[in-house]
Amino acid sequence: MNALTLPDIAAQASRQALPLEWVGMCGIALPVVINNQPSAAKADAGVSLDDGEARGIHMSRLYLALEMLEQENLTPALLRRILQRFLDSHEGLAHSAYLRIQLDLLLKRPALVSPLAGWKSYPLSIEARLKNAMFHVELKIDVPYSSTCPCSAALARQLIQQQFIEDFANRPLQHADVLAWLGSPQGIVATPHSQRSNAALHLRLDDFIDELPLIALINDAENALGTAVQTAVKRADEQAFALANGQNLMFCEDAARRLNLALRRSPGINAFQLRVVHAESLHAHDAVAESRWNWEA
Ligand SMILES: Nc1nc2c(ncn2[C@@H]2O[C@H](COP(=O)(O)OP(=O)(O)OP(=O)(O)O)[C@@H](O)[C@H]2O)c(=O)[nH]1
């Protein structure tokens, strides 16, 4: 049999000698292991093509290095080893390596009061870079929550006061009457508007961190807001949620400031930028606030 050598176009010289900032593959489907659980993910893997004379990179070498993600828990150390393999397999061609992994982090979250729990999905993106032996990891996490407008709450309270004046005008106040009134629709003649809201967190991690602090970060953000959206809900949980909203009235500015202060204290974070979006029910447009800490674009 005639053994033919397969043509290797990538190994040819480029017609235009020009380095490229990024070459690779986007949207690779693969499982990654987080907290010992496999999750369906999409990866973008690439290197710089610093040798402008080379026609192309070796895509298969990047692709095969990603197999390491199937074997062990996703950690900064694992990301670094994969990126190092990208570079080792492109010696002389590439000086910097990049990997982004996107998935929905599925966490079981307890109800506020009842002994129930349910699953909540947090869109997550993990970006790792290795260049000149400098290794960086960034996380992007979306945290959904509820926000009740403090201005609307004050306006609603004023209407309740007016209703009280009308209903109890020229009448001696009886404890039982007031209690019954408070429990009637008259006692809450106006309600403040509230909305499902989202905090998009973009965080730079400490370079020498051992674990990705995913759950700790989400907990810190949700505790700072006080009104995380719920999963399994019985009436007791809904009542506790109503109380949490009443005790945590928030403009988008308030939410951004709360998150900023909480994330500064959160371990393992070097810098962050965040964007909160309140999908207003008062308007057909959103109220948005952004905040940064130590962040240089
Ligand atoms: N560089 C590059 N490769 C591409 C592209 N689109 C498809 N490929 C293919 O990706 C495949 C894998 O490339 P390599 O990793 O160089 O494959 P290989 O030469 O068999 O592997 P090595 O022996 O490790 O170099 C090749 O068949 C390429 O043709 C592209 O736009 N750029």
Image: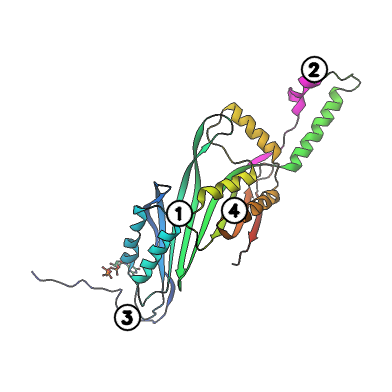
The x, y position of residue 82, in whole percent, is 38, 63
Q: Is residue 9 visible?
A: yes
Marked residue nearer the N-terminal end (3 or 1): 3
**Please, what secondary structure does the residue beneath circle 4 have?**
loop
Residue identifier under label 4: 266
Q: Is residue 266 left or right of residue 172?
A: left
Query: Which one is nearer the viewer's eye here, 149 or 255?
Result: 255
* Amino acid tagged 2: Ala
Marked residue nearer the N-terminal end (3 or 4): 3
| Labels 4, 1: front one | 4
Between the C-alphas of marks 2 and 1, the distance is 58 Å
Q: Quadrant of residue 173?
A: top right
Residue identifier under label 1: 102
Residue identifier under label 3: 13
| Range of magenta residues | 176-197
Marked residue nearer the N-terminal end (3 or 2): 3
